Image: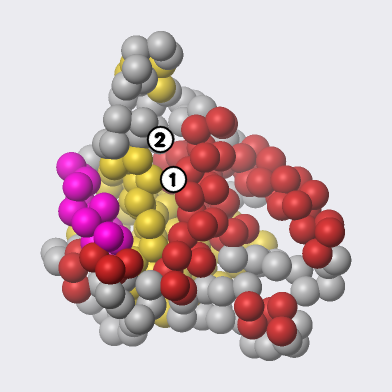
């Protein structure tokens, strides 16, 4: 199965991790909001989020772009904006309830912008990887010493990559959810940190991750007005 290269995917994961803090900083609006929206408006593909059955808060995270500036993927949030601060201050605090939807442009294998290499095709595995790494970016085992955080993150990141690259393994199950009203099969798995799923729609691959909100019964649809999401 062709996926984005591990180096490229890890860079995308890093972008998702920084998006958690960026979303928090921009939560009050202002210039940060404008910059966030502008990135989404540059995409040549549609963005997906939870459908109209979901009536809670919606907010922007961050887009990922290639070296030439082409937008390749991005994420939209629903529910409470995930933050590590609560778990750091109070390890026994209730876990936040959120769902993040990741949209990845469907791309064939192609040459890199500088012409020096080849970028592998994107696939459902690409969406699964970004969703898995996104979930890790907002997870902090409260009992773990801060000095061990990076070792834990490296280990879990490698595992997330391995799982995303083997979607037919027993770690994944099949979950049928509507995409623009059409039943669509997703690959789905749960862990102690939350859940991750990935599938495909017209011209894109869709990933999602969440915690405190059940994936069962969710639906996805094209976002008609991305500016309606809070930056």
Picture colour scheme:
secondary structure
Query: Is residue 38 a member of the stretch shown in magenta?
Result: yes
- Quadrant of the drawing holding the C terminus: bottom left
Q: Secondary structure at mark 1?
A: helix
- Report the magenta residues as a range: 35-49
- The reply to whether residue 136 is in sight is yes
- Is residue 106 rendered to the left or right of residue 187? left
10 Å crowding of disc 1: few (<14), some (14-19), many (20+): many
| Camera-nearest residue between 187 and 13 | 13
Residue 44 locus on image (x, y percent): 18, 42
Residue 130 locus on image (x, y percent): 49, 48
Q: Which residue is mark 1?
A: 127
| Camera-nearest residue between 116 and 127 | 116
- Residue 61 lies, with reference to residue 128, above or below; the image says below
- Is residue 49 rendered to the left or right of residue 224? right
Q: Which residue is mark 2?
A: 123
Q: Residue at x 63, y 78 (%)?
A: 85
- Is residue 74 rendered to the left or right of residue 137? left
């Amino acid at each position: 199965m062709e996926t984005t290269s591990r180096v490229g995917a890890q860079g995308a994961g890093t972008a998702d991790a920084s998006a958690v803090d960026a979303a928090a900083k921009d939560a009050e609006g202002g210039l940060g909001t404008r910059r966030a929206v502008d990135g989404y408006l540059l995409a040549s593909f549609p963005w997906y989020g939870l459908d109209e059955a979901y009536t809670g808060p919606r907010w922007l995270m961050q887009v990922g772009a290639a070296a030439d500036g082409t937008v390749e993927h991005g994420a939209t949030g629903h529910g409470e904006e995930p933050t590590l601060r609560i778990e750091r201050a109070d390890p026994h605090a209730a876990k936040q309830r959120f769902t993040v939807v990741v949209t990845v442009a469907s791309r064939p294998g192609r040459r890199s912008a500088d012409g020096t290499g080849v970028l592998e095709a994107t696939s459902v595995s690409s969406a699964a990887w970004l969703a898995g790494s996104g979930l890790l970016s907002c997870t902090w085992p409260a009992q773990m010493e801060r000095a061990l955080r990076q070792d834990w993150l490296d280990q879990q990141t490698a595992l997330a990559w391995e799982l995303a690259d083997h979607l037919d393994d027993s770690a994944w199950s099949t979950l049928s959810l509507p995409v623009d009203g059409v039943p669509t099969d997703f690959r789905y798995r749960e862990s102690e940190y939350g859940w991750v799923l990935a599938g495909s729609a017209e011209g894109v691959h869709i990933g999602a991750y969440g915690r405190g909100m059940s994936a069962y019964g969710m639906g996805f649809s094209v976002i008609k007005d991305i500016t309606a999401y809070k930056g």
